[in-house]
Image (spheres, coloured by chain):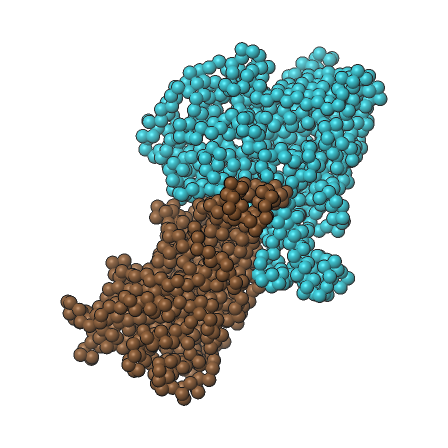
Chain colours: A brown, B cyan
Amino acid sequence: MLKRGGLFVTNHTQIGRRLPLLDAEAKATGQARYSSDVVLPRMLYGKILRSTLPHARLLRVDTSQAERLAGVKAVVTGRDTSGVKYGNVVVPEGFRDRLALAIDKVRYIGDEIAAVAAVDEDTAQEALGLIEVEFEELPAVFDPEEAMKPGAPQIHAHVERNISRRQLMEFGDVAKSFRDAYLVREDQFATQATSHVPLETHGCVAMYESPCKLTLWTSTQVPFYVQDDLAMTLKMPRGDIRVIKPVTGGGFGGKADGMDATDFCASLLSIKTGRPVRVANTREEEFSATRRRHPMIIRLKTAVARDGTLLAKECHLILDGGAYNHQGPITPMVFSTRFMLPYRQEAIRCDASRVYTNKSPSSAMRGFGSPQIHFAQDVQMDLIAGDLGVDPLELRLKNGLETGETTISGFHIFSSGFRETLRRVRGVRVPTGVKAGDALAGWGLGCTGFPCGTGRRSHSGSEAYSGATVVAHEDGSVTLLTGAADVGQGSNTTLSQIVAEELAIPLERVKTVSADTAITPRDFGAYSSRTTMMAGNAALEAARRVKEQLLDATAQALEANVSDLVLKDGRIEVKGSPERGLTFAEAVVGAHRSSAGRDVKGEGAFIPVTAEGSPSWSFGTNAAHVEIDRETGQVVVRRMAVARDSGVEINPMAVEGQIEGSVHMGIGFALTEELMTQQGQVLNPSLLDYKVVTPLEMPPIDVLRVDVTDPVGPFGAKEVGEGAVGPNAPAIANAILHAAGIQVKTLPIKSERVLEALKETS
Amino acid sequence: MLKRGGLFVTNHTQIGRRLPLLDAEAKATGQARYSSDVVLPRMLYGKILRSTLPHARLLRVDTSQAERLAGVKAVVTGRDTSGVKYGNVVVPEGFRDRLALAIDKVRYIGDEIAAVAAVDEDTAQEALGLIEVEFEELPAVFDPEEAMKPGAPQIHAHVERNISRRQLMEFGDVAKSFRDAYLVREDQFATQATSHVPLETHGCVAMYESPCKLTLWTSTQVPFYVQDDLAMTLKMPRGDIRVIKPVTGGGFGGKADGMDATDFCASLLSIKTGRPVRVANTREEEFSATRRRHPMIIRLKTAVARDGTLLAKECHLILDGGAYNHQGPITPMVFSTRFMLPYRQEAIRCDASRVYTNKSPSSAMRGFGSPQIHFAQDVQMDLIAGDLGVDPLELRLKNGLETGETTISGFHIFSSGFRETLRRVRGVRVPTGVKAGDALAGWGLGCTGFPCGTGRRSHSGSEAYSGATVVAHEDGSVTLLTGAADVGQGSNTTLSQIVAEELAIPLERVKTVSADTAITPRDFGAYSSRTTMMAGNAALEAARRVKEQLLDATAQALEANVSDLVLKDGRIEVKGSPERGLTFAEAVVGAHRSSAGRDVKGEGAFIPVTAEGSPSWSFGTNAAHVEIDRETGQVVVRRMAVARDSGVEINPMAVEGQIEGSVHMGIGFALTEELMTQQGQVLNPSLLDYKVVTPLEMPPIDVLRVDVTDPVGPFGAKEVGEGAVGPNAPAIANAILHAAGIQVKTLPIKSERVLEALKETS
């Protein structure tokens, strides 16, 4: 599987082609159908009753008044459920800690208690107000360090000291490295909670048809996981549940955990009423009741040799997990491994504790650990450079991982253009110092390496990580069936390009059917930047199988050898004799004839061959040019340069779109976004109060490319969905350091703190 | 493919199992989603303007006033179309004679002139009234014999004397047989036009999304033909069009021609407006503007030897084709071949002319020729028996085709239980004579043989007649993807049983996804009684491929030989050591592991191996017991016995349902149904005036079984959808003959005619 070098011919027609996403026009003109556009006859509208207390015992839930309200068709509570706990399907069962509807306790403000289905939303809302809930309030805890102390309120009965998972990881001889060190630097960092803010909130339509057929149209990144979770919690066979992902308005990790409460409630209400039911979060629910990015406290100690060689790291992480696990049990492990890249080291020790608190659950969010860890790591890099008196960029160049290396944790670096990304940004470095208008100007770097999907066997199942089917038709078109979930990142476009390239047909001739558990091959979903690598390789293999069949049939028809044939411009021709050939459509007809009409169909699948980490790794460097207003402390990012090794870019325009989105999210993480809570109550659950960066605040972005062809990725491609998020905050923090000498160790970087620091340093 | 004998073990768990159709509950409770249940955001409603004249030149179609009506979003006429003519896709292009919307001429009352899309049905209807059409009326012709005369109005410019197709067919030495005959009998028969009367009229929703994506949910028997026709008439690539068949409320051949005007108009209006458009026929349109059963004039001359052996037939058919061809060019050929069964003969000559008239087009209808031809043939059999003074049943026994014979036309009879069906009805014969209440009682027989789908290469394409895919999942369920169209006959149930049987899993574990051109393998559709035979064999092959993969993986896991393993009760076990085994689900997991996660997926396809006729043939005898009221002439069917050789019955309950439906339709054809026209105007286009037999008028039906295992059909099955329609009318006519000595040669059998005949004979 690794020996794909022969494929990387340079005369591609689809790979490397700049084009708008195939669904762009439909989205721009309002034709795209999101889950909210699924309108079914006799459809009901559901609403969820949520806890108003951060921690309480549920003594009584009386739905009788609500049930009597005209227009109410069903009310369900925890008593109507199987009582099976869910979490993320890939974590061991013991870590699944959440009831679909609370039975005994609620653990955060927003926890689901009951759900109502009614003829319209207003009636459902009114019915919620008629449900009487008797609570016994319990002491709550909101700070993870407090929650870990003996005697703290215990949020889950089976978890002592609220540590949802502790992960210890050690590679190499850490003690020795620290003994050998010329410099040991220790810093503590803290990051905040942020929200995913998809433009489309969680929402779905469930339709139960007796017997045993539940169809769910839902806004998700992981339709197959949703199917698994519903099967588990509804106690239905997986095959009785069909999950379809319509056009999706963003996920950013917030729709990657598996089943959401909206999915479960719509399904249960549909089963109970026998009618389709739509449930969707309001914007307020989306902010306060769904998942968020883990706030982290990071103590990082690094050993450095005299020549600047990084020797070892010792780190201590406390993750504020909120009330439930979801992907929590994976997080300390994932977060620890973020330290492995993009720098070489001989030893590392990590001690990570994910801790329950009475707040909304923390789970995956774009970059999953990278924004927090790489903020700490790369801010500390500049501080080390300062300590050593060396250039921060040169320090990184010295320590950056190169192609062919294996990290101390066993990650094999199949390709790395990391050092080249550093060299590329060196060229756009801007002067640091006082600028016109009394602003302080600075320039700083942030770097990451990022996986292209998860490695082998983090998953308990045995199916391929991604499967794909390609079928060729007599009109010269092909259908790609893929389980991959296009949530706006454009995977349908990318996968279509891969198939069109391999079969040498126009892109318009590829029809992609995706993310429908009943009809597409299984795929884990859109997370961990896995889709291009995994679903892409599966699609490529499927297309190759079709190609083989067409070559065989054509060779027979033309009385030629397969090895003498070439696919080109929608034709299969004898090399050097283009007049001897068939159109793609004719070749399909011929293949049908020679196989007694059997479909020309190819199957592909992908499971990483590496045991550790990821099939391959992307790398990149972001450089921020910031200005600080000396009067207000306001930090403005004037320009951002992003140098990426994402391997071969299948669609450079889509790559740029991902980079822009990453910078957008990264600046928000650095400067403006924070999901603020007080006693567990989210204070800013609206687009007005939660400050997402607006288009007007976005800086120009220079996208700088490096020439890397990955041996594992399809046509040499690697990920671009997440890797460029992490480096923004450290780049901005380091720019502030170089502009004003302010050490930023806490996010977000608020103007008042900067102003205060400016006063201290002046 | 023919050597399937080894499969017919007797310990089936699914084959032969009586069970309600899998969608019965959903239909009974209103949960089933028909095309009219597809409701899309911003959907418009379309209506079609139809000709009010039977034959006219179109001088002007002025849509300007209609377009100005508030709420009207688009008006289309023939000028907005490609002008490409359509017909049935399997007939040669030269026979395609119909424009999707008329441009120059209209040829019957109901012909499509324009279509409107508006915000609601009332507005669309109002807009139709605002379209000004200027006609130049042309002389029309309604009688096929008149239409064939020189000087008759010519309906299509390229067709002289209005003969849409003439088919001459001759096998054997007819002249010699007639010379050798002891008896030559000649009779003329006539049959009427009837309507399919599906409970769901033609209707669809079309949704065009730019660029190049048209999705159609339509009530059809042939989704893949609809796709082909739309591609042709809209000049779009086939792959850009997705046709989905939702739950369908009956077809009976009326939805088997391919694209209907509703399909085309909805699609064109959606393309023009960029919004989904629903178009559905009213009941009146369904009666007057869609297709109908060919009225026929049949002159039949038969040569018989002294011992009753049938020697030869000479027949002359005139088919009233109506205004357009549709499947017309196939009909004279198909109708001629109906004479080949169920009796042996040494020579035959047929001269069939299908003739255009200015009435609604005649095309396929359940039995497709059999009800007309077998009416003539089997009524004549009793007349011959009378002439010879032999028992009509014994005459049939003498001449019935047996297993292993080949007809003079080359049809190979792979299995025939025909003579056994005669013996079975012999036992239920009831006395003939005057009954209590002054009614005349009689008992009569009708017989048929019927194809199980069409033979090889009547179709110009190269794809399989039916394809199927089976995928096995880790929860122990499987998905069957089939292009077969379940239009109420229950093919989804039958195909599920076949897959469950082959894999030895519970029926509930088979999920069937059918009839969606984008995701299911191609299938010609539900006509010609082909589905169980063709889609069934394809599904069986696909399941067998899955079985092979699971056996291989299990043999590996158990360290056993594949030949020692057996599938049983959801497990794969070592024969004789049931403790050594895996569940089906475990076997799938194992197969996934051993193939690096690739899907456990099997493909199947079916193309008949026989060059002539059908893959195999069903046979049957119906016996009617009728009473005739001497005062009114009213004929009442008191009881019907149906003895069928439909091979092995996969679902006896479904078989009985098909038989009941066939008898229902057959009695209507014999006694009550007639689509009456005057000057081309349908006189009875309503359920009140068109007399479908009601449940109260249905007689009790004895279903008599014979034990036949067909070597071609899946698990030995043959067709049952159509073969039992044809024998009803002759059985009733013969019962009248034996009750009252009345020779019935014209259908329907009206009370007034019977009364008149009674007077003549008394």
User: What residue is at 57 percent from the left and 61 percent from the top?
Assistant: B597
Residue B504 image position (x, y, % from top left): 68, 54
In the rendered structure, the answer to whether residue B193 lies left or right of residue B140 reads right
Does residue A62 lie above or below B702 as drawn?
A: below
Compared with residue B502, is residue B57 higher up or lower down, i.e. above or below?
above
Relative image position of residue A218 (x, y in whole percent)? 45, 55
Looking at the rendering, in which quadrant would you find the C terminus of chain B? top right
Residue found at the far right of this picture: B307
* Residue drawn at 27 percent across, 77 percent down: A743
Give A565 or B425, whichever is nearer the viewer: A565
Q: Position of residue A220 (x, y in %)?
A: 44, 57
- Res. B297 image quadrant: top right
Rendered residue at 67%/55% (across/down): B548
Where residue B207 sits: x, y (%)? 43, 41
In this rendering, position of residue B654 left or right of residue A283: right
Q: Is residue B663 visible?
A: no
Residue at the outermost front position:
A576
- In the image, B757 versus A601, the foreground residue is A601
Horizontal side of residue B308 vs A89, given as left or right:
right
Q: Which residue is at 51% across, 40% downward?
A: A579
Q: Is residue A528 visible?
A: yes
Task: Report the number of discs.
Answer: 0
* In the foreground, B447 or B267: B267
